[in-house]
Amino acid sequence: MDGVLQRVVSILIAVVIFFILPVYIAYEKKDDISYALALKITTDFVDNVNSRGYITSEMYDEFIADLAVTQNSYDVYMEHTAKKYNPVIYSYSDDMSTIRSKFDYNLYKEDFEDGEIVIDSGPNAGTYNNLILAYDLSEKKYTEEQILDVISSTDKTLNIDMSLDTYKNLDYRSLPGVTSIYMPEHDTKVYTMNKGDEFNVIIKNKNTTVATTIYNVVTLGAADTNNTRIYVNYGGTVKGEGYIEKTVEDDSKNYNPENDNSDSNTSSLVNSYITRGLVLLLNGEYNDGTSHSNSASVWKDLSGNGNNAILSGFDFNDESGWIYNGLHFTGKEYVALNDFNSSQMTIEMVVKFDSVSDVDTPSQSVLSCINNGGAGIIFNQLNATDISKRGKFSFDVYTSNEDSQISSVVAPTIVQANKIYSVSGSVGTMALEQQEGDDFAYETNAQLLSVNGKVDGIPFNDTYKAPASGSTFVIGGNPLAGAGAQTQFKGTIYCIRIYNRALTEEEIKQNYEIDKQRYGIE
């Protein structure tokens, strides 16, 4: 009897070793191949989403179809972690030590720009002054169900391109549950994400594979009942916002995209602006001197002074380089100018920003010779350290005054992304009234900053401090002595003008009117 039992056991062992085990190994290898393929498909999908910043139904359907190639069925879990910077307005007490109230910036933007919020009735009725723009940072997670609901339904989308009055009159009960998405001006339904958000995908097989079945049979079900053989968890940070549609026309045309009635030659362009004291004029429409070139690495000076600018770090592709007759920066490029350092100067530019809450560069030098001295136009994003400057331009001038080394003028205008601005900073002696023979009745020393023709200023009676030796003017960052720059700027520059004198308020406004017409500034 014992011999028969031994023979039976031996036969069973032989069957397992010579027949079942090779089959199990073969199917286990098939599971390994399926895992490797599923991992590649998932990582490709997530990387594609993070680089674009959005998901469409076509992208998701293609992802599911690709997974089907592995001949397994999967549970798919997607999660979007949205980081939201919501602009708010704080009203402080007179001594700036206590916050009196907080207001939604979208609802009280115009009141903020006027410097006063008045509530006529209700428990919060009163007049609120000492207004400071800040932001609330929050995170919200959106599930796969919410994401799929967006890309498969029309009544869960919201077009956020609306006027303030329309926004104020919205019935908030009709707003979608997922407020970070909207329907762009095309047929594809899009679930959008912002730069800095997180997107993560988890997949695991829900079917029982042949290898798992064989293993359970051989072990008589004594093994772990978890049948998951393919498990992928992959995610990353959103790097792009490809759903943002370009608002400009064909790049091959040599005119400014915002206004197709621009000047037909460089002479009329130069003479349309104030020319007295003009030492540099760069214009993207004529970046090559008399025409436009998408590969120009030298930005030709149109003022006649030969102060050509040198481009550094540009890739000259769809992101970094000449786009729609403007020069687009991604935060790693800069343009070096000649040394225009002077105690009296005016620097002007036409600019558009990609974002107003960039976590990498909360304060960006756009046009500057600031290097332990000098002057420059700075844009302070909504998440800048100095809350009094958030969302605003400042014109900073270094002085030799040890108690107050930087003289700064801050414009009250709150900057918006993807909107063109004409900005001018002027410092020095300004002639306020001109008589016959170019004699001036009186002069004043002032520091002015203008944003879209709205001029603010302060007296400037300090001694200008020159930047470190070897520094030059830089577009897109702060210069380093000798060579290079601390690159910061992310956006588009259309035009740069530099004067070796201080333009008056009237002259600044005159130049702005030309910019307004040429670039369609609102």
Image (cartoon, helix red, strand yellow):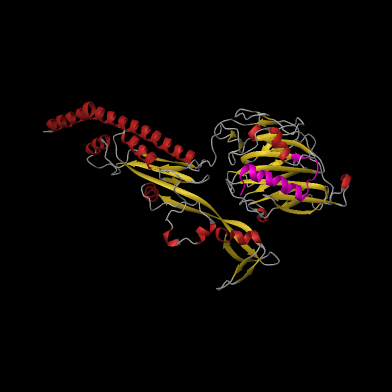
Quadrant in which residue 360 is drawn: top right
Which residue lies at the image location 45% right of the left edge and 37% below the top edge? 48
Image position, residue 282 (x, y; %): 69, 35
Residue placed farthest to the left in the image? 1
Q: Is residue 516 magenta?
A: yes
Q: Is residue 398 visible?
A: no
Is 212 located above or below residue 416 in the figure? above
**Which stretch is magenta?**
498-522
Q: Nearer the viewer, residue 105 or 113?
A: 113
Which residue lies at the image location 31% right of the left edge and 33% below the top edge? 70
Residue placed farthest to the top in the image? 18
Please state the total of marks drawn on the protein image: 0
Is 227 located above or below residue 386 in the figure? above
Image position, residue 241 (x, y; %): 51, 42
Q: Is residue 90 visible?
A: yes
Is 85 located above or below residue 72 in the figure? below
Residue 42 falls left or right of residue 127: left
Q: Nearer the viewer, residue 479 or 315?
A: 315
Residue placed farthest to the front in the image? 436
Which residue lies at the image location 33% right of the left edge and 33% below the top edge? 34
Instruction: Locate the N terminus by quadrant.
Output: top left
Q: Is residue 366 magenta?
A: no
Image position, residue 51 (x, y; %): 49, 38
Image position, residue 62 (x, y; %): 36, 37
Quadrant in which residue 30 is drawn: top left
Q: Nearer the viewer, residue 394 or 278?
A: 278
Majority secondary structure in the magenta region? helix
Is 492 located above or below residue 142 in the figure? above
Residue 306 falls left or right of residue 417: right
